[in-house]
Amino acid sequence: MKKVHLLHNPTAGDNDFSKKELVKLIEKENFECIYTSVKEDEWDAFENDAEFLIIAGGDGTIRRVAKSLMKRKRIEKHFPLALLPHGTANNISCSLEVDGQIRDIVRSWHKSDLKKFDIGKVQGMKDDLFFLEGFGYGVFPKLIKTMSKLEEDPEADVNEKIRAARTVLLDIVQNYKARECTIKADGKDYSGMYIMVELLNIRSIGPNLVLAPSADPGDGELDLVLVYEKDRGKLETYLTNMINGENKPYKFNTVRAKSFEILWDGKDLHADDERIKLDDPIEIKIDVQPDMLDFMVMSKK
């Protein structure tokens, strides 16, 4: 019987599964399950004899676990990560095609593939930081700032929360002043006036905005998505369609590269779902750190 360590965020998403229900589902598939809530102290004292870690939570919980793992010494055990999507947007799980019924996902762990997962490393600020999903400027950090000030409806389900965030973003896009951005990607210049500049490691960010549908988090590159001032109307149309339940694809201006230098004429940026405010605009360097994590994904064999 394989021993596994379940890391659970009991406040994520719609709280569909309790601790008792999750442990029961996992143990029913003949895994010995150790349970830890990520809301507890010392939650990241991982069991070294566990075969892999299970993350039951959303994108923020995955980022938190990844941050803890990357602080470990090279000689310490390297844990594969299994996901039980349990949040609102679940962009990372969607990009890895980990979806469906929880019972089926747990069952798939008996015969799964390992998917290498890169991270983006950001340098130039007071402290270096990393991102799993995306890093950028413009309307998205503005969305994070705006949503943090709004009172959340406790009765709203996941779909209603996503639709509400898209509606707020549409208003931001319609009113956001384009800013100058100096950009070099693998040494090539892409400077211009933009309302959105995003470096994506996965296909979607935020309220399931699919900005880079062909992004591969294990290819050693990032997708630089550029929305010029002149493309504002196209982004508005894309968001309006999504709000109305029409998932029509929109092709964004995208550049794939490994190394970036960016100077944005503003003080707000984001790394994943964290908004960061700078004292002054500064040049930032971003590089890909390949194969930093291993995720267990459903076998295609």
Image (spheres, helix red, strand yellow):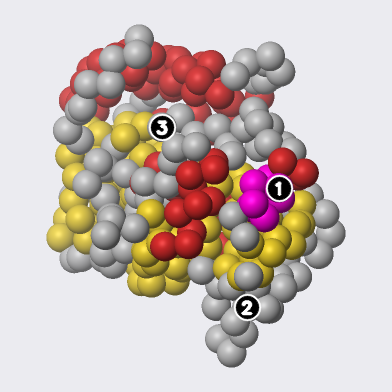
Q: Residue furthest bottom?
A: 75
Asked whether 254 or 154 is in front, the reply is: 154
Q: Position of residue 67 (x, y in %)?
A: 59, 64
Asked whether 117 or 96 is in front, the reply is: 96
- Is residue 174 shown left or right of residue 151? left
Q: Residue at x 35, y 10 (%)?
A: 244
Q: Quadrant of residue 20?
A: top right
- Is residue 174 shown left or right of residue 212? right
**Circle number at residue 24:** 1
Q: Position of residue 43 (x, y in %)?
A: 77, 61
The span shown in magenta is: 22-28
- Reading the image, the residue beneath label 3 is 208
* Gap in angstroms between the C-alphas marked 2 and 3: 31 Å
Mark closest to the chain's N terminus, 1 or 3: 1
Disc 1 secondary structure class: helix
Q: Is residue 257 visible?
A: yes
Q: Residue furthest right?
A: 41
